[in-house]
Image: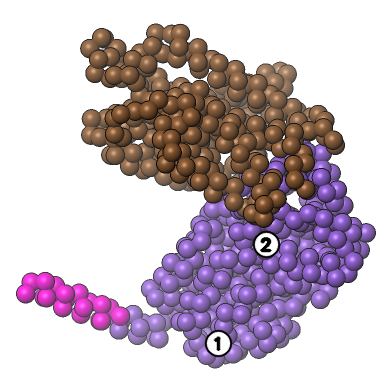
Chain colours: A brown, B purple
Amino acid sequence: MSWENLGQQLVNGLSLGSIYALIALGYTMVYGILRFINFAHGDVFMIGAFAGLYFHRWLSPFLAGLPNLLSALIILFCSMAVCSLLGVIIEKCAYKPLRKKGRLIMLITAIGVSLFLAYTAQLAFGATPRGFPPLIDVHTFGGGSTPAVTSVQIIVLGVTVALLLGLRFIVMNTRTGLAMHALSLNPTAAALMGVNADSAISFTFALGSAMAGAAGVFYALFYPAIDPFMGLTPGIKAFVAAVLGGIGNIPGAALGGVLLGVIETFVVAYSPNIGVSSGYRDAVAFVILILILLFKPSGLLGKPENEKV
Amino acid sequence: MRTALIFAVLLACVCFGGCKRHESAKNAREIVIGEFTSLTGATANFGQSSNKGTRMAIDEINAAGGLLGKPVRLITEDDQSKAGEPAIVVRKLISRDNIIALLGEAASSRSLEAAPIAQQNKVPMISPASTNPKVTEVGDYIFRICFIDPFQGTVLAKFALGRGWNNVAILTDSKQDYAVGLSEFFKKYFVNNGGTIVSEQNYSSGDKDFKAQLTSISASNPQAILVSGYYTEAGLIARQARELGLNVPLLGGDGWDSPSLVDVAGPAMEGNFFSNHFSAEDQSPIIQNFIRKFKEKYNESPDALAALGYDSAMILADAIKRAGSTDPEPLRDAIASTKNFPAVTGTITLDEKRNASKPAVILTIKDGEFRYVETISP
């Protein structure tokens, strides 16, 4: 036993981690600006997967002639658009009226929104798990002694990296990104300097939710059984990833997601070596969360914060 | 003073309310049967199917004039496929709805949760599809109308050995009593009869990623893999195994039986095998008749859970008729003495351990449909 298939397990871990990273971005961006955890984020991710399923159904007659990859990208962008719209609506209806009431109240509201979305989806889509269409032709490269990589994994990894770079560009190089930065540093000073807080916050939700929507479609491509409660576990794992990387820090969220995916996969693969059952994968995520909170509450890339949250 | 008064009023309400309810239960103009099942959640297909079968049986019974001259009413509670819920809904069914008997659950873990409550309250419980042996060991009020895992595990092991697959890997859902039991009994027979288990891996219900386990399994070069668990995960496992280039046949138990299996796995499910309670391809008139009636009512084909749900209600009705009463003890004895009952899923005789012994069928998946392969008798 011991360390066989290291390459394959690394590939498995990276593809799982890239999805955690995408979801973690939404948590971290909202936290960076509003200093609260948007627990409804996992359910936006679920809506993203269902949106992908239905867009595939509705658009497939129109997209029939297009190359596979292009039609998949169109469906992906449609789902991202639906999710960012949903994110903005959630922010306007549920969080904005409470913004001045304190973070705990918003946190509890977020849990309420999460349950509302999950059960509404159950009403609308039914409770049974649904299959998800393979939007891209699946080819397996390698296998045997070399790691097997599927075309889906390669494309998902590529699109994830592109989305991350795009996000970084928006946050670092545009005026709205600058406004987001200013808000996260000091909301009062930013308002005094003429930054429109409302629109910057809405934009943050739109961007974060679009990432969640993309993650939802990718997740459904990897694990094509989608149900209204699918957002729960990945949502919490991504939250752990965001904390691991340093919540509020965008590269940190990406790093935390990838790390968590790889660690989890390695736990399943190699924990029997030390006599631990592979069923402990979920426990590991939370053990990491506890250790981080104990020893480095600001996360791997986060800066220590004096303010008590 | 005021508090005491309110308390007294409340107490009176509880007392009289209680008395009245008790009386109404005795003189009821209808027979109330409770059903707890998973209409939503991870194994929603099971609950929805067995509920459809049970409802169809109750409708037929009522159309034929009810039981003991009274109409039958079915009260269904959803346990959301969650641990903890069965206890809540079963207590509600027993204490508030005054049910005379309880039908449910498919998943063994959830039946095991409800069984002690039914036993304690002397409400006979019939599980349509829980195959873990521990379920009926809870007490003399707990019955089942399906085969048990020692048998199902043996059937699968026999089948694998019969095909010449001597090196098999096992992937078990360690959260489910059903899956753990099935793997254990499979292993026992398989190893005692010359087979080798080359790799043993676990996962938990609700997991979506199995590539780590499958990669380890693939390194051990098995000729087949036993995927002991429920359909949601089985579908994903099949798909990920094929993606990793692991093309050996997968084996499963009756937990695989659901249209979702093929919906999720698509072509990855082709050529895999699982054991089940009945095959829709069986040409015997009782099965074909059931399928025809089910299709007329629900516009879809019944799966094994629907047939078992139907049978569980029919066996209960038969016992009520024979007992001539709905009192706990005569009813319990009547169910226990069920003999050669012609059910859809085979002729049912309950043994002294309150289990049914029936043959199992092996099905394979071909062109997205479940096809009959062979029948293996106890």
Give amino acid for label 2. Ala
In the depicted structure, whether residue B66 falls above or below residue A217: below
Measuring from the top left, give residue A91's x and y in whole percent. 35, 29
| Label at residue B331 | 1
In the depicted structure, whether residue B55 falls above or below residue A114: below
Which residue is drawn at the image coordinates 81% and 64% (left, top)? B156
Which residue is drawn at the image coordinates 40% and 22% (left, top)? A204
Specify the segment rendered in magenta: B1-18
In this rendering, would B211 be left or right of A23? right
Q: Main secondary structure of the magenta part?
A: helix
Q: CA distance from mark 2 to mark 1?
A: 32 Å
- Quarter of the picture holding the N terminus of chain B: bottom left
Which residue is drawn at the image coordinates 61% and 80% (left, top)? B137
- Quarter of the picture holding the C terminus of chain B: bottom right
Residue B218 visible to the viewer: yes
Name the residue carrying label 2: B179
Question: Tag 1, which chain?
Answer: B
Q: Nearer the viewer, residue A50 or A290?
A: A290
